[in-house]
Image (cartoon, rainbow, N blue to C red):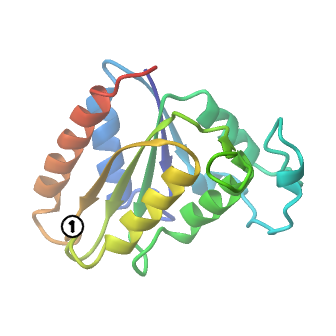
Amino acid sequence: MKILTLLGSPRKEGNTSKALKLFEKLVSESCEVEHINITDYEINGCLGCGSCKKVMEEPACVQKDDSLVIFDKMFASDVIVYATPLYFWNFSSQMKTLIDRQYCLTKGQAPKERKSFLNGKHIALLATCGGPDEENADHLKGVFDKVGNYNQCTIVGKYIVPFSFRPDFEKNTNEVANRMAQDVLNVELR
């Protein structure tokens, strides 16, 4: 199984990175893991021009930046992990920019005519937050559900590491990373 992890934190060695590295270590013995730090790539915001919807055979984004490189890596992966700190009840701006650009990966608006280049991919959310999960990360999880549904992906799970600035962060991270690794390793591919 090939796993692509996308780190969407501007802090390359922050809490989200620590949680993601632990997950990667847990699955690397039995899976191929490729790690992408989004801040190392040039990704422009979506222009909302709709040009991508006029071509059905490819993503067809008019912008030729590094998002296309990341998309190719997503296409080649079985599982995609989106790792982000919770910023203002949502994805970090770095991750949100990449997610907005994924609009070009799905063609057709009506659910019955929709075709996604990510169809059947397994995706997981890993997020860290300074407060509790409940009534804090709810919006983030809801948006992730909608993104996964629109892109015709199978959601493996949404894993939140709460209270990431407390001394028990490491214990919480271990519990979440172990549960996430177990769920991802149990994914059945087509």
Circle 1: is it few (<14), some (14-19), or many (20+) Cα within 10 Å?
A: many
Q: Inspect this view and state whether residue 84 appears.
A: yes
Comparing 51 with 176, the one in front is 51
> Percent x, y for residue 16?
36, 58
> Percent x, y for residue 165?
22, 72
Say which residue appears at 80% left-offset and 51% top-offset. 65
Comparing 116 with 72, the one in front is 116
Task: Answer left or right for 143 relative to 163.
Answer: right
Task: Answer left or right for 122 relative to 117.
Answer: left
> Percent x, y for residue 75?
63, 32
Quadrant of the snapshot with the N terminus? top left
Say which residue appears at 22% left-offset and 33% top-offset. 182
Task: Answer left or right for 45 relative to 8.
Answer: right
> Percent x, y for residue 149?
50, 52
Using the image, determine if residue 72 lies above or below residue 85: above
Q: Quadrant of residue 122?
A: top left
Q: Amino acid at mark 1?
A: Pro
Say which residue appears at 40% left-offset and 56% top-offset. 13
- The total number of labels drawn is 1
Say which residue appears at 21% left-offset and 73% top-offset. 134
